Amino acid sequence: MSSRTYNAQYYQNHKLDMDATAIEWRQKERKRLIKEFGGKCIKCSYDNSIALDFDHVKNDGWSDKKRHRKNVIFWVKQNPERFQLLCKNCNWIKEYHKRRLLSLCRRQVQPKKD
Ligand SMILES: [Zn+2]
């Protein structure tokens, strides 16, 4: 049996345990990082960690997703300076303004039809 087959089989047999361990690790790391980032939204100071997000300061989250499909915790640990803590409301408001700006830019770029 090749090591790849063995690993795949091992994962199938221990999938639930491994997934639970990974989830537990991510939750622990998320909590620790939220504390490191000040524990509250930088815009409105909301501090319920359930509704806090690690937001890409420069809206460049797409580049992380393009490179690898990793959890945001991985990227926050790699480059903490690229992130800020926002609550869901403030994050959504930021997203709304970003989309509105993009839509305005697209309209300006469209060639005029006579
Ligand atoms: Zn907020």
Image: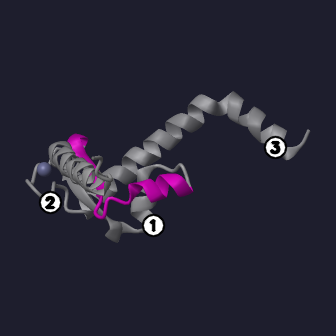
Residue 47 is left or right of residue 58, and the answer is left
Quadrant, the N terminus: top right
| Sequence-first tag of 2 and 1 | 2
Q: Pointer 3: residues within 10 angstroms few (<14), some, or many (20+)?
A: few
Amino acid on which the number 1 mark rests in the picture: Gln
Residue 84: % across, % down: 25, 61
The span from disc 3 to disc 1 (Cα, nearest Å) is 28 Å
Q: Residue at x 25, y 56 (%)?
A: 108
Label 3, on which residue?
A: 4
The answer to whether the beta carbon of the residue marked 2 is less than 8 Å from any atom of ligand 1 is yes
For the residue pair 31 and 61, the one nearer the viewer reads as 61
On the image, numbered disc 2 is attached to which residue? 42
Q: Residue furthest right?
A: 1
What amino acid type should be assigned to the residue bearing mark 3? Arg
The residue that mark 1 highlights is 78
Q: Residues within 10 Å of mark 1 (few under 14, many from 20)?
A: few
- Relative to residue 74, is residue 68 drawn left or right? right
Rendered position, 109 above or below 18 = below
In the displayed structure, does residue 110 sit left or right of residue 46? right
- The image shows a total of numbered marks equal to 3
Q: What residue type is labelled 2?
A: Ile
